[in-house]
Image (cartoon, grey):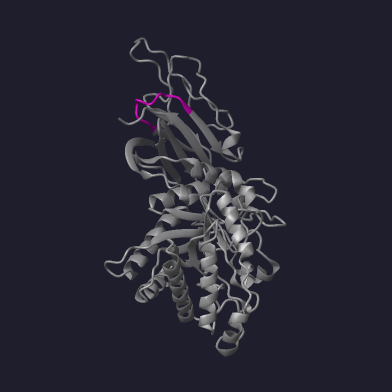
Amino acid sequence: MVATCSIAMAACSNSAAPSSTTAASPPVPNVLAGPTVGVTNQVLGAAESNLAGLDWNTGNLSAVAPLRPPLVRIDAELGAISPRPGVIDTGPLLRKVATIRANGGEPLVIIDYLPAWLGQSTVAASCPGCDPTLVAPQDWAAYDSLVRTVVQRLATAPQPARVFEVWNEPDLTFWNDTKARFLELAAHTHRDVAIVTSETHLALHVGGPAAAMFTADPTFIRNYVAAIEQADLPIDFVSFHWYANYPCLGPDHPESAGERSLWEKLKCSNPNLTPASYGTLIAKVRAAVQSAVPPGRPMPELVLDEWNMSAGGYDVRQDTNVGASFTLASLIEMEDAGLARAYYYRAVKGLPTTPGDWGIATQTGGHIPAWSILYTWEHLHGERLGLVGSQPAGVWIRAVRSGSSISVLVANFSVQSAATQPLTLQFDPACTHDATVRTIDAIHASFDDTGISPEGTTDDHVEAPSQGRLGFSLPPNSAMWVTTSCPPIQ
């Protein structure tokens, strides 16, 4: 039967061709003009559901509970844990970790932001005017003791956290001290986690430096990896951030009144913004890390633990179908580049909620279109299938097989010349020739808004896809989810 689509979706071509006079050659639906991309039976590997991780720094995580995020990143905030010497209260942090576990996620805890009492002597001695929470401590023994206590309590808790990250964006304003002093702090933190690992005999993981990558220059990451390797310390992953609108800040509103001056200088919409920048950056970071790892040493995993369209200011595109198509295309770029873990910034919007805030859920449980993308991505388990044929410019495609079902996700995104894009998908002719199509576009804010089961057309003998072909007209800045049944590979 031919898959039917609502008029608003403008997705499937289901007009029947003139009837054939030969029973062996049934009539076929017209297939829209445009490039043809084939979905093959070649298995590329497992679908990377861990790319649908989230950063959580405000609101209640229950707002994203239906998503069941596989990974969730949070701050330890050492200053809140130890507001004065001799006080270490990990209770609130342990409760956040337990909440992440209850929602199905693996916590990543950032070891960051020094207690002011531990950094004040540094400010007085060598970093006048610096923020005492963003410098290296003068008392390394006190720092090591604090970090080891926090890591040990988290690692051995009934609901544990066992993945730890050194700092957050030390290549930007979240570090006021010298680069050499940051690398010294990083080495201490890696060593502290290694000591707790040996004491508890637990499999703990440590990495960093959560570089902002504002200039897309991986030199800072290369130096970080080299310093940890030269100290002969474990480094399980290398983390970095990317917001595709860099070097522009979010164009629509500053994050706070105090940041308006800088925001006014850097706000804009980057005319070259593209999801392809993720693939390019991942390749550059991988090359930098490889150059810093000595021969015979294992290659750390690459982790993109903050990403979205814009940072440093709000961007209303993130709340719309534009943000949804960008999100899908970026995820496809990450997976194609071999990335296994990523964390979308962020889980829950702040209060008061400003248009363009990054969260995929409001604090009252509302969802922006990108929610539907991350939800679908996280729940599509199976094997990635290869594609043949040239994908049109501005179109990203991903195919996943699970049992006898094939799901194809398609993003049509352009920051400058958004336009309707015709596309034909070619499946194996043995597929059972019915399909469901769901679309996020300027009219539909969620995949739940569309999706019509096949019911046939004017000719009940017409099968679709025709000989495995399905034609579409992709709306500008849209995301499409196509499901069809195919017999399992023998």
Task: Give the residue furthest to the left.
Answer: 295
Q: How many marks?
A: 0
Can see residue 386? yes
In-front residue for pair 270/328: 328
Indicate the quadrant where residue 321 lies. top right
Q: Is residue 328 above or below residue 173?
A: above
Q: Is residue 239 left or right of residue 375?
A: left
Q: Where is residue 372 shown, x and y percent of the image?
A: 56, 42
In the rendered image, residue 126 lying in the magenta stretch gets the answer no
In-front residue for pair 109/402: 109
Specify start and end residues of the magenta stretch as a single range: 426-435
In-front residue for pair 141/231: 141
Indicate the quadrant where residue 32 lies. top left
Indicate the quadrant where residue 238 lies. bottom left
Task: Give the residue furthest to the right.
Answer: 352
Residue at left offset 50%, top offset 81%: 178
Q: Is residue 327 left or right of residue 388?
A: right
Q: Is residue 13 above or below residue 229?
A: above
Q: Where is residue 395 shown, x and y percent of the image?
A: 45, 44
In-front residue for pair 195/49: 195
Main SS of the magenta part reads loop
Can see residue 420? no
Q: Where is residue 98 shown, x and y percent of the image?
A: 59, 55
Residue at left offset 32%, top offset 31%: 489
The image quadrant where one finds the C terminus is top left
